[in-house]
Amino acid sequence: MAASTTTSSTPSPGQPGALRNFFTELRYDKAGLFGFSVIVLLILMAIFGPLITPYDPAAQSVVARLKPPAWLPGGSWAHIFGTDHLGRDVFSRVIAGARISLIAGVSVVLLAGAFGVLVGLVAGFRGGRTDSVLMRIVDIQVAFPGLLMILLIVSVVGPGLVTMIVVLAITNWMIYARVVRGIVLSLRQTPYVEAAEMIGCKPGRVIFRHILPNLTSPLLTLGILEFTNVVLAEAAMSFLGLGVQPPATSWGLDVANGKDYIFVAWWLITFPGMAISITVLSINLFANWMRVTTDPQEREKRFARAKAAERRRGKRHDAPAPAPVEA
Amino acid sequence: MTTMDAISDMPLLEVERLCVEFDTRAGVVHGLRGVDLSIRRGETLAIVGESGSGKSVTAQAVMGLIDVPGRIVSGDIKWKGQSLLTGDGPKRAREIRGKEVSLIFQDPMTSLNPLLTVGAQIAEVLQRHLGMTKTQARTRVLELLEAVGIPAPPRRANQYPHELSGGMRQRIMIAMAIACEPQLLIADEPTTALDVTIQAQVLELIAGLQETLNLSVILITHDLGVVAGLCRRVAVMYAGRIVEMGLADDLFERPSHPYTQGLIRSTPRLDDRMNRLIAIEGSPPSLLSPPVGCSFRARCPIAVERCTEQPPLAVVHPGASAACWRPSVPAWQESPPLEAALT
Amino acid sequence: MGAFILRRIFQGFLVVLGVTIVVFVATRLVGDPAKVMLPLSATDEQRAAFEHKFGLDRPIADQFVTFVGDLATFDFGESMWQRRPAMDVVAGRLPNTLKLIAAGLGLAIILALPLGAIAAIRPGGIADRITVFGGLFGLSLPQFWLGLLLIMLVAVKWRLLPTSGYGGWQYFILPAITLAVPATARLMMLVRSSVIDELNQQYVRTARAKGLRFSQVLFGHALRNAMVPFITLAGWEFISALAGYTVVVETVFAWPGLGLTAMQAIRHSDLFLLQAIVFTVAIGIVLVNITLDVIYKLIDPRIKLA
Amino acid sequence: SQVTIAVGSEASTLDPQKRDDGGERAINDNIYETLMMRTPQGELVPGLAAAPPTQIDATTWEFKLRPGVKFTNGEPFNADAVVVSVDRIIDPAFASEQMSYFGTLTGAEKVDDLTVRIKTSGPDPILPSRMYWMKMVPAKYSSDPKFATEPAGTGPYKLASWTRGQEVVLDQNPDYWGDKPTIDEVHFRFIGEPGTRMSGLMAGELDVITNLLPEFVSSVPKSAAVQGVETAVIILSTENEATKDERVRKALNLAIDRKALADSLYGGYATPTKGQLVNPRAFGFNEAIEPYPYDPAQAKALIKEAGAEGKTITIVGEAGRWLKDRELIEAVGSYWKDAGLNVEFKIEEFGEYLNQLFDKNHRPDAVFVVNSNELLDADRETSFAYQAGGTASSNKDEEMAEWVKQARVETDVAKRKELYAKITQKAHDNNYLVPLLNMQDIYGFSQRLDWAPRVDAKLMVKEMKVSE
Amino acid sequence: MSAALSLPPLADREPVLSVRSMTVEYEASRGGLWSKPSKVQALRDISFDIRPGETLGLVGESGSGKTTIGRAVLRRLDLADGRIFFRGRDITNVRGEELRKLRRHMQLVFQDPYASLNPRMRVLDIVAEPLIVYGIVKNADEARDEIGELMRLVGLPRDAHDRYPHAFSGGQRQRIGIARALALKPELIVADEPVSALDVSVRAQVVNLLQDLQKELGIAYLFIAHDLSVVRHISHRVAILHSGRLVEIADRDALYDNPQHPYTEALLSAVPVPDPRTQRARKRLIYRGDIPDVAHWPSGCHFHARCPLATERCSLQVPLLINKGEDHKVACWHR
Ligand SMILES: Nc1ncnc2c1ncn2[C@@H]1O[C@H](COP(=O)(O)OP(=O)(O)OP(=O)(O)O)[C@@H](O)[C@H]1O
Ligand SMILES: Nc1ncnc2c1ncn2[C@@H]1O[C@H](COP(=O)(O)OP(=O)(O)OP(=O)(O)O)[C@@H](O)[C@H]1O
Ligand SMILES: [Mg+2]
Ligand SMILES: [Mg+2]
Ligand code: NI
């Protein structure tokens, strides 16, 4: 008995005003803001890549091979990041690589996500035997030696972007199914979903109106984190020669190509490698921020900690303290 | 109930004008707004009030458990006359916590560490405060389990919380609380999560221990019935303040504050044949921006102009004080006449 | 418990069966080993002889029957690439991978526990911010890239450690670090968040109300209870490393482990070796999973193994 | 003193007669010896044979053996050993992968202890070259199951240890019959990744690495290059739509600037071919043929003349197997595009690539391959890519195929040479092939190592020296 | 409030709900793909009637199966045995679309006023949802007037329409929940501890509201509670549930003034009275022992372990619920 009557006025996510708060909230967290900016930049790069790359990323030039970055002796501003072993412009390739990473990431997350969510919804909603069967399938696939299977499938089908996307989707959907099922199962126990069923909502309405909205934020967070995994996996597979195939570009592929030149041209692996790292780091920072922000409880805690830190510092000087990087 | 001679004059615990605030995104929640309390050795004090009135925060403040986002902004807490907030206080507070003062929480389900045997959890206190060895502690644990009425202590001591029923767990909590023979036991709604039959058992246990160990007890509850059976003195809290304080017998018979009156009248009674309950209209104020003056003003049928000023907790008649400008004025009519059966 | 383990073993048996079937089908589709394995100049007769030798000229169904029959005796035939029983090759390489995983994961665990716990003490504090950022950063480094950078700097430039290969303890350091970085990051973040969660639990309040010292609360209660998710993740790290995710590190450091061997087997279309590897790994995963369940049971008395 | 040598793949066996892989060869070349050997420059000289063999009749060659040679297990090297070696390797039950080198052999017979005769199924002019490839094994011990892991040869080194997956260590053979090598311990490490090999060399852990990329010549402590046995070529189909026109094929040859490719792509560590696929060091190389000139204008004109402008040519190739294969294919393709054709690349996964390379019924327009000729005899190239019906050939020239057959059994050296001259000339004139570049083998050495690499790409440690 | 509906006296009305020998089982372990799930009996042989305009109070310890009864009556759970009749019609096996139609006539009010309202929906949408679902209105705005009337009925401010649940206090939220349940004008409302989560001062408001609504609309309530005092105020008849079995069912006053079953006695004596003098004077029966657990119901009478009257028979034979007075049924061998 006796629940708390704290009149909380924090709007839950999904309510009007939540979007408007987005930037206000983002300002609190410098790291999140940084992540968000880089993501925006990446998306722009991916969309407008062909327009902003100074050169065709695949254009070879045998005379301008292995030119160092602009600021090193021998470099020129024509090739800011230098050129690779085939005389291709590294800067252009880094920009072009963003597209593959994004395409791979988005497609895998969408494909795997759609399938996983479907399975999770069905399992969670139907329950009983359906649930048992589906979840046992998930269990079995989770116990599969993942990467070995990827290697195997790729070597059967032959490497390539599409293969890679499909294979990664096939090996990554289980997490969505598990998460969704878990949430649906627990949501089905919540009184308001039971109430919806009691007043006679059909299953479709229950799912779309009452269950799905609760899934968006955990799924978004999960999707973003999975996205980083896919970007890394894409890079690793391309590095092993099982992913994107030339003449297409990919950061992982560039690192793979550049690794043989590591002693003559460090920039070949450095820039694409950094591109991967910065991308993933930014997304992680953003996701981290988002996870906190979409969770009212976490948000409350973040606020309280910031306030407490402010008070601790406030004893010394009165400058408003920045909110901490928080998770 | 308790023998009068066990109550010495020296207050064991004094809470003075205690204010606690919480930082939330919505603003500052004024959890406690100047609470005054004191309890003497062997005394039983009940704190009643509705949800959110600040009962638990008071208990936590005494135990030194106020954590981010909360903080004590003003006031003082004294243990045997010595402040726990200033100077060496905090250090002393850490020493007495669990040893001289102990706390029982409301929810026995989550208050025990699910991964440790209950015996180990009790032994932990003994080892920490009394410096007992494992074997010494073990013997004492069995004694304690015996004392709180748990059958087959050796077996129970080795069980995990999830293997015990709610009532058992609450007994374990009590065993843990009395392990170091404290002088003050604060029980924060110890029976709220339990069924009436089990509640009766637990209350009886606390009453028994109080007598045998000459404990002082602060019993926090929202159930006036529980208060009635166990406590000598009662403090009624409303919106972060104590609005009335007095001897139980007195308070139930002649409630001074309108809120206390309303509370007593709206509580359904088993021995009462009224069909219709009397409700206090409205709901408690938000502590984000508590109203100036008397917080009960908005719901009070006898509120007057003056109520916009905060009334002090003043003695109304011997043994009772209330924070009201119009104490003891009946705020509600007598119960409506007994209605016939519905049809 | 015995019944539970039996059931899990049966379940694991299903997994292994599923894996072997998938592998069998997949490997029959991988390019024609007779072409890949023999020199370009080999004659058709030689190729036919090769296929005959390995039984690849028989109908698929036939091959499958023999395959399943041989499984029972752990006989995976002869590796076409190494020309010795495939299981011998696996047996030679598996320990290397296990040692690498042990070193890497051991390092990760040793680092993650204290770092995560320290960060959790005061969420939002300096130590926490550094930990969180460091963790996210560690998660963002592609392993192959990190490995290459380490080789370039530590081994080549400073000549502190060997660049690659397998040998004494010096050979373990760089690969173990490379393997450990993302795992450490994940584990550390997990320790941090679950310790924070645990510290917010009611039973921690009880522990504090009992007057326990903070260190007792942290180590005796919060950290201890955080072990359940921690072991889950650590087990998952182990499984995924076993499932082939060491291949990148092994490739970069020329580590003669199972992952590298798998890559080579694929490159050589060595069906039998691949089958042996995947089968072994599948069994390994099943065993690890069962072990994990038993560990859970030991840590968390609430878990029922039935 | 000791050296450490990196090899790309691990030996699967140390039986010198079983497999045909680089890892095994690199080690066994130092443990075992052959009847015939080559000088570093590629000249065939007697090895375990006391003198060059003599031909007794069309199908019999007689070898006199070097006396006093012993295997490291104590067995003597004598006619028995040769007979066993020959019989062992050609035994179908043994299924040696090296059979492609010894297809003509039918057996050997002992004449006396130091004289042995080797029989062939038909006249085999290149038998001496073949014997350069056959390692001699001890007569008795070679049937021991341990033989595959504990080798015993007559060479300058013997096995000290073999740690699977890591390294093979060789010690000097104290009883070696020849000159004592200066290096007494050799470590072979197996490192697949070129980048890792390179790191090892830079870090001073390795003394010799093979297949160094041209770009790195300047960054390694020391390097050396030698004309190798590999030649890149594109085989054109004479049947397909676009390439059946001889003028188009000619244009394809003229359109390529081989010199530029060699210089830019391979940093000068490759040489343009001389109008033929045959390795310049090999027997049967035709000195008379002029290299195809680089004449883009004429190429364009020819294409126009043939009405092939804008027609599509598909190049089938693969990536990663050979040095800069993809880059070379793409570069060639762009030359062809410049000449007015439309070029489509089909870079396949290796297995699929092989399917297409070996498909007798559907020849690709153009298929890229790097041919290697370890025996240094034109027979290899001609039977592989020239002879109609050969493993990878794409023409239907029956006449030329007949010549190749004749050359195979012609034991008269001069006549054979003439046949090869005719073959190569005809193929050149008909533009059956687009020979591209003769590759050089580049080696990276540590500062202290001295060695002149060999034409036949063998890593002969006894020829190496280290300066401490 | 308008005058009460004119209905025949309670006793003469045809029951709106009749439950006969209802038994409900839960799966104790989920069972694998192959293994059969093991079952536990949560309810055993439950029978009772509720008449229009009547409130049946259902009291019992935690875990005794109160919620289970509510859910079974509303056909959210399948019966292992027994029948349920709604307005004389057997609804035991009704499912699918038919069940959905049936739901119009029976509704549920939840215990937790915080969790039972979708935080993402406006109050208007929440209350209008039943109307939309049954196609009575197309969208919430169409139903504004009707909803406004409902709001007035349950005592919510009119401007509540466009606000979200979090902006309301617990008591107000419970009113929203009641308004939603009323939207379809049901004949039966199962109220599962509707006031347990509310504060005393607010609890009285909600109890009063429920009583007023009953008078006005003639709804029948199955009022579930663990608090005997509240039940006394609202119920016409009271049923006592113990470990999945009804042990006593009688008119309110008969039950409170003259409890027959030892368990009922224990319950009544354990409830503290908020008056120190009375409380001190009361004779309290405190029986040792714990509430039995569903997975391990004792044999015979489930109460025998705690019962002072227990004899050997009690531990062997299950006492039947039989009439011991004027419509006063008790399940005990000794009363
Ligand atoms: N961690 C916190 N953050 C914000 N506000 C808090 C926190 N803890 C307590 N409060 C506020 O302090 C006030 C007093 O709370 P307290 O827990 O003492 O109430 P209570 O009287 O114990 O109520 P209940 O009967 O529900 O236990 C409430 O308004 C509550 O909202
Ligand atoms: N879904 C379920 N699966 C298995 N057992 C269940 C399930 N739901 C309830 N039970 C068990 O059935 C018994 C009756 O539960 P129920 O929720 O009806 O009790 P209740 O009287 O409503 O208790 P409370 O007062 O705590 O709400 C309990 O012992 C409970 O553990
Ligand atoms: Mg409280
Ligand atoms: Mg219930
Ligand atoms: Ni209560």
Image (cartoon, coloured by chain):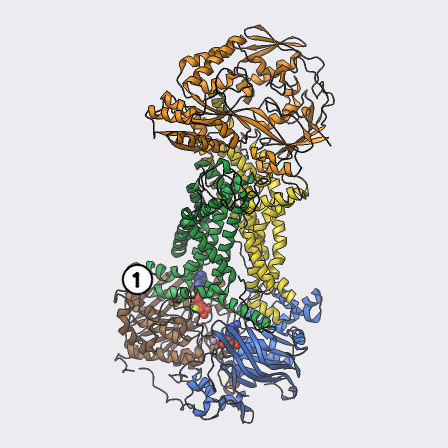
Chain colours: A green, B blue, C yellow, D orange, E brown
Percent across and percent down for residue B107 are 53, 71
Q: Nearer the viewer, residue C295 or E276?
A: C295
Q: In this view, does A145 lie to the left or right of C221?
A: left
Q: Would you place residue A23 above or below residue E213 in this image?
A: above
Amino acid found under the numbered disc labelled 1: Leu
Vertically, is A265 above or below A129?
A: above
Residue indicated by mark 1: E99
Q: How many marks?
A: 1
Q: Is residue E21 visible?
A: no
Q: In this view, does B329 lie to the left or right of B154?
A: left
Q: Name the one closer to the observer, B74 or B36.
A: B74
Left or right side of B152 for A30: left
Residue found at x 44% / y 36%: A158
> Does the rendering let one see residue A63?
yes
- x, y percent for residue D134: 60, 18
Label 1: which secondary element: helix
Residue B280 found in image quarter: bottom left
> In the rendering, at what x and y percent does residue B171 appear?
58, 71
Q: Which of C148 and D352 is in front in this view?
A: C148
**Residue C257 to residue C118: above or below:** above
Does the beta carbon of the residue at mark 1 sit less than 8 Å from ligand 2? no
The residue marked by circle 1 belongs to what chain?
E
**Residue that lies at the very extreme toward the bottom in this rendered image:** B317
Residue B251 drawn above or below residue D283: below
The single residue placed furthest to the top in the displayed view is D57
- Mark 1 closeness class: few <14, some 14–19, many ≥20 residues within 10 Å: some
Q: Position of residue A146 (x, y in %)?
A: 50, 44
